[in-house]
């Protein structure tokens, strides 16, 4: 379903928004909506970095805030569409930059509206996944909803158990795909062919959170079948994290493996930056 076909926009509480506006005239008329991953937080660091480069940027907290879902479960996609609308009031075009769960949301939202010109999906997925569980025995529920209805998703393999010690969840996602019925995978596939704008996929071959490089290949093939081009930036030695030029690296100490060597997040970010500048209309190195 497209937003124009009945999606109901929502009112976003101002406390869930963080604006980073250029100090002077904007360097581009493309505004950017920044979406964090499984933290759902407002990625103020990425927003500020883009703002200092002359980009009107809006970082959105998309769960665990006033008026929002407490966890990433049946999060209304209308939330992202409303944020796109806020940027469209100030900018001629709107691009989405999302990491991990935020990349999932970005690709889904872009497929629902004509109001997005480009998507930069960092550590992407090609399908919608099951949402957060409060208890292991709870029934599976979608991570996303549209017009009050959960969207199709791939269920996580409940039989998968992490190894002793620090887990790497990529094997859980691969196992979940392997046992999913073909019709489940087909229904949950993000309809990237509906989005005719520019797509930049940034993925590490050693992603230990989920198989983003494999997902990037599937997205590219799906769009190619529809006659659409896709830019893929990859690094076989990189993991799940991407640090763009000018950003402060996040704390890499996490209770799970993210993959890649210590220098990989910045290396992958530098490699992706020219393509990102291009779709945002920034001068090279801007």
Image: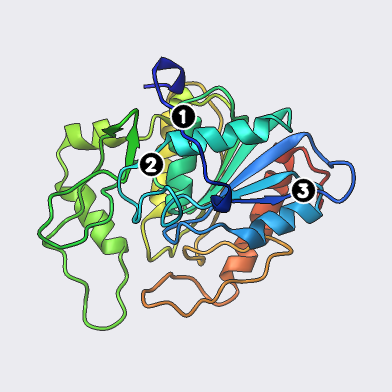
Q: Which residue is mark 3?
A: 21
- State whether residue 146 is above or below residue 133: above
Identify the residue at the far bottom of this view: 165
User: First in sequence: mark 1 or mark 2?
Assistant: 1
| Image quadrant where residue 165 sits | bottom left
- Structural distance between the alpha carbons of marks 3 and 1: 24 Å
User: First in sequence: mark 3 or mark 1?
Assistant: 1
- Structural distance between the alpha carbons of marks 1 and 2: 25 Å
- Structural distance between the alpha carbons of marks 2 and 3: 32 Å
Q: Which residue is mark 1?
A: 9
39 vs 187, left or right, is right
| Image quadrant where residue 153 sits | top left
Coordinates of residue 100 in the picture (x, y in percent): 45, 54
Res. 75 in view: yes
- State whether residue 196 is above or below residue 95: above
Coordinates of residue 49 in the picture (x, y in percent): 73, 58
Tag 3, which secondary structure? loop
> At x 25% / y 32%, what residue is drawn?
186
Give the foreground label among 2 and 3: 3
> At x 41% / y 30%, what residue is drawn?
222
């Amino acid at each position: 379903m497209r937003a124009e076909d009945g999606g109901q926009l929502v009112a976003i509480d101002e406390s869930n928004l963080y604006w980073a506006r250029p100090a002077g005239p904007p360097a581009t008329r493309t505004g950017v909506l920044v979406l964090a991953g499984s933290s759902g937080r407002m990625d103020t660091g990425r927003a500020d970095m883009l703002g200092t480069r002359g980009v009107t940027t809006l970082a959105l907290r998309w769960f665990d805030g006033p008026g929002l879902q407490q966890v990433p479960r049946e999060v209304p996609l209308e939330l992202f569409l409303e944020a796109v609308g806020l940027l469209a009031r100030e900018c001629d075009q709107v691009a989405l930059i999302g990491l991990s769960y935020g990349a999932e949301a970005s690709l889904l939202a872009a497929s629902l509206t004509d109001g997005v010109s480009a998507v930069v999906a960092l550590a992407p997925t090609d399908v919608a996944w099951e949402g957060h569980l409060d208890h292991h025995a709870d029934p599976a529920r979608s991570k996303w909803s549209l017009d009050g209805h959960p969207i199709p998703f791939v269920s996580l393999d409940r039989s998968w158990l992490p190894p002793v010690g620090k887990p790497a969840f990529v094997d859980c996602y691969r196992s979940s795909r392997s046992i999913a019925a073909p019709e489940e995978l087909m229904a949950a596939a993000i309809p990237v062919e509906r989005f005719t704008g520019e797509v930049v996929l940034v993925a590490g071959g050693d992603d230990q959170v989920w198989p983003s490089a494999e997902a990037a290949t599937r997205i590219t093939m799906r769009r190619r079948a529809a006659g659409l081009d896709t830019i893929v930036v990859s690094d076989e030695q990189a993991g799940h994290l991407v640090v763009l030029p000018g950003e402060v690296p996040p704390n890499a100490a996490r209770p799970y493996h993210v993959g890649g060597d210590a220098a990989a997040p910045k290396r992958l970010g530098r490699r992706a930056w020219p393509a990102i500048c291009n779709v945002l209309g920034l001068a090279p190195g801007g």
